[in-house]
Image: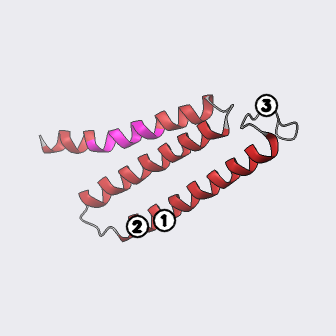
Amino acid sequence: MIKTMSILNISFPIFMYFVGLLVFCFKCKHLLLMLLSLEFIVLSLYFGLYICMSFFFYEYYFSMIFLTMSVCEGALGLSILVAMIRSYGNDYFQSFSILW
């Protein structure tokens, strides 16, 4: 029972990671959808990190550093989104001639 539970605990963050990666790859028209999928990927990585650290009885100090960096990444992404909407009026990637 314990071995099955640990396999389920480790496979769920991997499934979350690949779902976020698929959304990131296939829904790349809007910047907001891309940022949400990146945050979902970071959340799945944090969840997997937490499970591995609790499985091996490590301290959670590194997870606090990881959360701090992911909050900085989210704030930077939102500031880019606000600047893009202010300058172009939307968050479509197809409206830029520079990127595509």
Of labels 3 and 2, earlier in sequence is 2
Q: Classify 14 as above or below 48.
A: above
- Location of residue 50 in the rendering, given as x and y in whole percent from the top left corner: 33, 56
Instruction: Report helix, strand or loop for mark 2.
Output: helix
Q: Are marks 3 and 2 in contact (CB under 8 Å)?
A: no
At horizontal 63% and vertical 57% (from top left) the residue drawn is: 76
Q: Is residue 13 magenta?
A: yes
Of the residues shown, which amino acid type is indicated by label 1?
Thr
Which residue carries the number 3 mark?
Answer: 94
Q: Mark 3 or 2, which is nearer the eye?
A: 3
Of the residues shown, which amino acid type is indicated by label 2?
Met
Which residue carries the number 1 mark?
Answer: 68
Estimate the spatial distance between the alpha carbons at disc 1 and disc 3, rounded to whole Å.
32 Å
Q: Are marks 1 and 2 in contact (CB under 8 Å)?
A: yes
For the N terminus, the image quarter is: top left
Q: Nearer the viewer, residue 77 or 100?
A: 77
Density class for disc 3 (Cα within 10 Å; few <14, some 14-19, many ≥20) is few
Which residue carries the number 2 mark?
Answer: 64
- Location of residue 78 in the rendering, given as x and y in whole percent from the top left corner: 62, 51
Which segment did they paint magenta?
A: 9-17
- Location of residue 81 in the rendering, given as x and y in whole percent from the top left corner: 68, 47
Name the dominant secondary structure of the magenta segment. helix
